[in-house]
Image (cartoon, grey):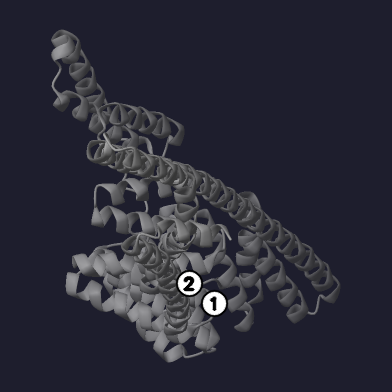
C-alpha cells in the first residue's frame, strides 16, 4: 500500500515532448538543410545569424528526441555545442551542455551529468544568465539527490531558490520549495517538510497552478499520514482528488483513490477502502498501468481478507501476483505473498500459509540485496565524485603555485633591473659632476677616485636590492595569499546555510585579516627603515645590517 510522492523537477530538463512529433522533426530537418544550402551559396560572406540559427535548429531537434531516442538527442546536442563553440555563442553552448547533461541523467550516468551541468553553470555565470544559473543549481541538486548526497542537494536547491526569489520567479521558487520538502520528508523531519510544502502550495495558489497545487496537496497528505494524523491526511488527499477532477488528470485521480483507500484501510473502514481501491483499479486498467493494476489488486485482496471475503481475496491476490511477477516488481510481489500467507492462515490452511510466508521472506531478502547493491553503487559514485574533486583541487593548487612562483620571479627581475638602471644613473651623475668640477685639480682627481671607489660600492646595490626585495616579498606573499583565502571565505559566509556556519567562517576570516595586517606592517617597517637610511645618506649601512 505505497503512497505516491510528488517531486517537482523544475527546469531539470528543458521541456521536451514525450512522443516524437514526426512532422515537427521533418520541419526542423528541412529548415536545417535550407540553412546549410544558403550558407554554401553565400560562401565566405555568411552572416553570423545563419550559424546561430543552425545552433538553435540542432538544439530543438535534440529536445524532440530527448525522451524517446536519447542517443540521437545526444548526437544533435553535441553538433549544436560544436557549432556554438565555433562562433563563440555562449548561450547556445550553455543550452547544449544542459541538454547533454539531461541525456546522461536520464541514462543514470550521474557523474557525467554532474560534470556537464557544472560546465553549463560556469558558462551561465559568464553571460550572467540569472535564470539559467538557478536552473543549473537545481539540476546539480537533483543529481546529488539521486546519488544520496543530500547535504549537497540541499545546498544547491537553496542556491537556486535564492536567485529565483531575487528574480521574482514564483513558479521556479515553488518547485524548489517542493524539492527541499521532499528531502526533509525523506529524513523524517516532518516539521520542515510541511513548512516547505506549504510554502510551495501558497506560491502555486497565487499562480493558479492547478497541477502544482494538486501535487502539493498529495505531499502534505503523505507527511500527515506518516505522522499518523489520518484525518488531516484524508483532508488533503480529498483536496488533491477534487483538483485532479478539475484537470481531468486520470493518473492523479488513480493515485488519490489509492491514497484515500490506504487511509480508510488504516482507519479500519474496510467497505469504503474497497470502494476507493476499486476506483483506483478501474482507472489504472484504463491507463494500462501494469504496476498500478498489480498494486490495486493487492490492496483489494488484503482488504477482502479483513471483510472475511476469502474467495474474492484469493482472486485479487493471484491477479496481483501474476502481474507483479510479469513486470518484475519485487516490492508488490513481496506484499502479495504476505497477503496470501495471511489469507491461508485466516482460512485455516497453515501449511500453505507457511509456504507463502517463506516466499515472502525470500522476496524480501532479494529486495534488501537489491537495495544494498543500489547503496553500494551510490557510495561508489560518491567516492568517484569525491576522488575527481580532489584531483581537480590538487591540479588547481599546483597550477596556482607554479603561477605564483613565475610571477614572483618576474617581479624580482623587474625590481633588479630598475635598481640597476637607478644605480647607473646615479653613478653617471656623480662621475660627470666630479669630472667637470675637478678636472684640472690633482687634489680633486683624488676625490673623484675616492668617489669612484664609493660608486663601486654602490654597484653592489643591485645584489643587495635583491635581498631587500626578498625581505619585502615574504610579507607581501602572506598578504596576497591570505587575501585570496579571505575572498573565498566571504563567499562561504554569504552562502552558509545557518548561523553557526556563518560564525565559523567569520572567525576564520577575522584571523586571516589579522595576518594580512601583521605582514603588511612588517613590509611597511622594512620600507620605513630604507627611507630613513636614504635621508641620512647611509643606505650602505642598511644593506650591511641586513647582511649581518
Q: Which mark is residue 135?
A: none
* Residue 194 visible in the snapshot: yes
Instruction: Name the residue rendered at 25%, 78% in the picture.
Output: 202
Percent x, y of residue 41: 15, 8
Percent x, y of residue 400: 49, 48
- Residue nearer the viewer, 87 or 170: 87
Q: Could you classify mark 2 by the number of other residues whose Cα lies within 10 Å: few (under 14), some (14-19), or many (20 or more)?
A: some
Instruction: Name the residue rendered at 21%, 75% in the picture.
Output: 205
* Residue 105 visible in the snapshot: no
Percent x, y of residue 253: 36, 67
Q: Is residue 9 left or right of residue 385?
A: left
Q: Is residue 361 left or right of residue 152?
A: right
Q: Alpha-carbon distance for marks 1 and 2?
A: 6 Å
Q: Is residue 22 above or below residue 240?
A: above
Residue marked by disc 1: 187
Q: Quadrant of residue 415?
A: top left
Q: Residue furthest right?
A: 351
Percent x, y of residue 378: 63, 57
Q: Could you classify mark 1 by the number of other residues whose Cα lies within 10 Å: few (under 14), some (14-19), or many (20 or more)?
A: few
Instruction: Name the residue rendered at 71%, 67% in the picture.
Output: 337
Q: Quadrant of the N terminus?
A: bottom right
Residue marked by disc 2: 183
Mark 1 and mark 2 residues within 8 Å of each other at the beta carbon:
yes
Q: Secondary structure at mark 1?
A: loop
Instruction: Name the residue rendered at 41%, 44% in the picture.
Output: 450
Amino acid at each position: 500500500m505505497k503512497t505516491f510522492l510528488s517531486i517537482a523537477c523544475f527546469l531539470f530538463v528543458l521541456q521536451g515532448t514525450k512522443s516524437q512529433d514526426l512532422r515537427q522533426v521533418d520541419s526542423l530537418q528541412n529548415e536545417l538543410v535550407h540553412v546549410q544550402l544558403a550558407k554554401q551559396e553565400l560562401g565566405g560572406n555568411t552572416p553570423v545569424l545563419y550559424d546561430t540559427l543552425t545552433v538553435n535548429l540542432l538544439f530543438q531537434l535534440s529536445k524532440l528526441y530527448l525522451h524517446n531516442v536519447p542517443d540521437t538527442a545526444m548526437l544533435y546536442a553535441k553538433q549544436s555545442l560544436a557549432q556554438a563553440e565555433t562562433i563563440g555563442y555562449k548561450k547556445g553552448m550553455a543550452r547544449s551542455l544542459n541538454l547533454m547533461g539531461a541525456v546522461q541523467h536520464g541514462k543514470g550516468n550521474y557523474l557525467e551529468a554532474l560534470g556537464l551541468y557544472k560546465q553549463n553553470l560556469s558558462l551561465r555565470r559568464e553571460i550572467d544568465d540569472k535564470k539559467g544559473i538557478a536552473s543549473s543549481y537545481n539540476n546539480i541538486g537533483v543529481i546529488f539527490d539521486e546519488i544520496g548526497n543530500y547535504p549537497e542537494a540541499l545546498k544547491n536547491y537553496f542556491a537556486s531558490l535564492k536567485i529565483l526569489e531575487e528574480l521574482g520567479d514564483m513558479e521556479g521558487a515553488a518547485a524548489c520549495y517542493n524539492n527541499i520538502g521532499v528531502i526533509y520528508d525523506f529524513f523524517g523531519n516532518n516539521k520542515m517538510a510541511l513548512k516547505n510544502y506549504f510554502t510551495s502550495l501558497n506560491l502555486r495558489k497565487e499562480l493558479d497552478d492547478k497541477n502544482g497545487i494538486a501535487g502539493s496537496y498529495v505531499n502534505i497528505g503523505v507527511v500527515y499520514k506518516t505522522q499518523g494524523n489520518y484525518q488531516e491526511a484524508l483532508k488533503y488527499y480529498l483536496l488533491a482528488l477534487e483538483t485532479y477532477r478539475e484537470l481531468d488528470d486520470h493518473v492523479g485521480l488513480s493515485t488519490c483513490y489509492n491514497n484515500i483507500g490506504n487511509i480508510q484501510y488504516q482507519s479500519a473502514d474496510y467497505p469504503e477502502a474497497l470502494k476507493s481501491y476499486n476506483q483506483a483499479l478501474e482507472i489504472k486498467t484504463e491507463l494500462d498501468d501494469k504496476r498500478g493494476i498489480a498494486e490495486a489488486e493487492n490492496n483489494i485482496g488484503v482488504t477482502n481478507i479483513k471483510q472475511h471475503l476469502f474467495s474474492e481475496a484469493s482472486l485479487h491476490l493471484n491477479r496481483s501476483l501474476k502481474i507483479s511477477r510479469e513486470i518484475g516488481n519485487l516490492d508488490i510481489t513481496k506484499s502479495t505473498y504476505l497477503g496470501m500467507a495471511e489469507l491461508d492462515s485466516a482460512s485455516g490452511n497453515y501449511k500453505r500459509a507457511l509456504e507463502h510466508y517463506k516466499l515472502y521472506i525470500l522476496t524480501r531478502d532479494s529486495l534488501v540485496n537489491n537495495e544494498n547493491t543500489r547503496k553500494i553503487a551510490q557510495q561508489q559514485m560518491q567516492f568517484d565524485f569525491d576522488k575527481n574533486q580532489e584531483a581537480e583541487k590538487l591540479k588547481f593548487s599546483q597550477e596556482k603555485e607554479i603561477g605564483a612562483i613565475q610571477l614572483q620571479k618576474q617581479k624580482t627581475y623587474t625590481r633588479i633591473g630598475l635598481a640597476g638602471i637607478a644605480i647607473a644613473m646615479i653613478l653617471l651623475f656623480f662621475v660627470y659632476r666630479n669630472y667637470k668640477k675637478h678636472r684640472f685639480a690633482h687634489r680633486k682627481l683624488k676625490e673623484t677616485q675616492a668617489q669612484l671607489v664609493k660608486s663601486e660600492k654602490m654597484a653592489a646595490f643591485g645584489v643587495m636590492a635583491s635581498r631587500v626585495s626578498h625581505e619585502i616579498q615574504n610579507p607581501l606573499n602572506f598578504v596576497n595569499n591570505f587575501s585570496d583565502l579571505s575572498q573565498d571565505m566571504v563567499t562561504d559566509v554569504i552562502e552558509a546555510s545557518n548561523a553557526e556556519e556563518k560564525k565559523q567562517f567569520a572567525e576564520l576570516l577575522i584571523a586571516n585579516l589579522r595576518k594580512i595586517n601583521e605582514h603588511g606592517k612588517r613590509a611597511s617597517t622594512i620600507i620605513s627603515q630604507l627611507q630613513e637610511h636614504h635621508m641620512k645618506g647611509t643606505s650602505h649601512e642598511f644593506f650591511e645590517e641586513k647582511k649581518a
